[in-house]
Image: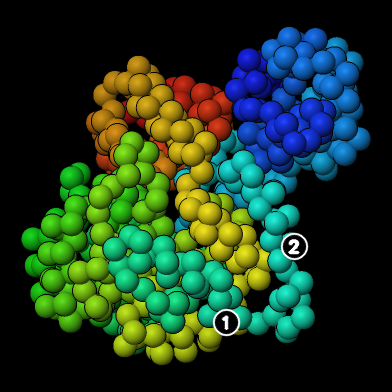
Amino acid sequence: MGRVTGAALASMLGAADSSQPAYRWLFETLRSLIANGRILHGTVLPSEREAVRRLGLSRTTVSRAYSELRECGYASSRQGSGTVAQIPGGPVAGGAEPLPLGGFGPMPGSTAIDLTCAAPNAPTGMLEEFQKALEQLPRYAATMGYYPLGIEPLRLALADYYTRKGLPTGPDQIIVTSGALSSVAAAGRAVMSRGQSVLAESPTYPNSLLALKAHGARTAAVPIGPDGSDIEQIAAALKAVSPSVMLCLPDFHNPVGTLLDDVRRERWAAELDRAGTTGIIDETCAELWLDSEPEVLPMAAFSKNLITVGSASKSHWGGLRLGWLRTPRHLSGAIVRSRMSMDLGAPVLEQLVLANLLNSGATLAQSTRDSLRENRDWMVDELDRLLPSWRPNKPAGGLSLWCQLPQPRSSALARQLKSVLLAPGSTFAVEGHGLEHYLRLPFAQERVELEQALPAIAEAWHKVAV
């Protein structure tokens, strides 16, 4: 059972809201911290005496706020423990990003730490964003509720987002989907026939390949170097394979973590145009910068033949289940027809939430960015201590480290571990095998989980290393 100190709680609470009674501010802020995962289920809150001392509030204020938490199910009193934070009904199992590993995360009842997924939890304030969107919902509830291309406020917000990034975009070029994979699938169906080839860098994000292979695409691979996409090799592969489509991840590549500069983006786009290949640009990690905001243009700024895929899953929350396509105008009609063959639109409430977030200027929450940066730096240092022969990268953004191992034992390590679930390097290989010298280690999980996982990984590695 974890415990939050009075000093730590004071830091999380921030400045009091003087527009409402102190107990109400404290209660609502604590409830938000618990609901949004900043204070985990089962965490012991500071005693009333410690909270009074650290927060500078009266005993009556703290006592009433704790009482309100207990009454609405966000806390309980346990003999000998004090006041314990809780999610009403308990946290729901699962919710991790599935990868093609023969399963979908831990089995029910498993206590294994799942490091196969790389996605952050909902940021602080997501509950309040849904409450705000509910107030806007009645005007849509008066309709049948079908918006196959997305509701107008969200399409306008996304068009404005790209325009501000240096890629002039109209709302007619935006198609909202139920996630990045739906976007990739819709784009692929629109521009390629069954049996045609798709070129992808290896390693790559495997679920995007699956979305295209389900449409009958044949895959071909080109290696990506540790410094990012090799344009010379890409040009040679485009000439040799003549693919209909190429999957491109210029922004904090998943899993390698590299970021492409404008010079290489422009050259890559030119090579795609020269080959007559449509580029599907995966920008799901574009806002996941951790050190400083990159001064790069969206890759579609360099060609009118590139389809851009975006998603709220990494930058905001996977539970929104929203993605989008930014389409060239000459391909919009084909992509619209393809998209409508899959489903008839994403949920309205979640679209309102995302539109509000974008209009407020929110991309990745600052608290999430800070937490990711701290976890990344801690994990790099801890790997140096526990596994000095490993060579992890230190990406400027993204959600995971891409570790080079001294022996090709990535799959053996994943099989050896019982308390931690890992995705070996072969999971990210376009061919489905190889990359045994590599392992992806996400750092988006809670620190307490990572602190348990890394020693277990080190212990298992010493058993399988040859």
Residue type, mark 2 in image: Glu
Q: Position of residue 30 (x, y in %)?
A: 73, 32
Determine contact: label 2, label 1, CB under 8 Å: no
Q: Which residue is mark 2?
A: 135
Asked if residue 103 is positioned above or below residue 381 in the image, the reply reads below
Residue type, mark 1 in image: Pro
- Real-space CA distance between mark 2 and mark 1, rounded to the nearest whole angstrom: 22 Å
Q: Is residue 181 visible?
A: no
Q: Residue at x 12, y 64 (%)?
A: 267
Q: What is the secondary structure assignment of the residue under circle 2? A: helix
Near-viewer residue (161 or 443)? 161
In the picture, measured across the screen, residue 282 lies left or right of residue 112, that is left
Q: Residue at x 32, y 21 (%)?
A: 384
Asked if residue 213 is positioned above or below residue 146 in the image, the reply reads above
Q: What is the secondary structure assignment of the residue under circle 1? A: loop
In the picture, measured across the screen, residue 124 lies left or right of residue 285, that is right
In the picture, measured across the screen, residue 202 lies left or right of residue 439, that is left
> Where, quadrant-wise, is the C terminus in this rendering?
top left
Q: Which residue is mark 1?
A: 148
Give neighbour class at mark 2: few <14, some 14-19, many 20+ (Cα, 10 Å): few
Corner quadrant of residue 369: top left
Near-viewer residue (17 or 173)? 17
Q: Position of residue 180 (x, y in %)?
A: 46, 65
Near-viewer residue (25 or 50)? 25
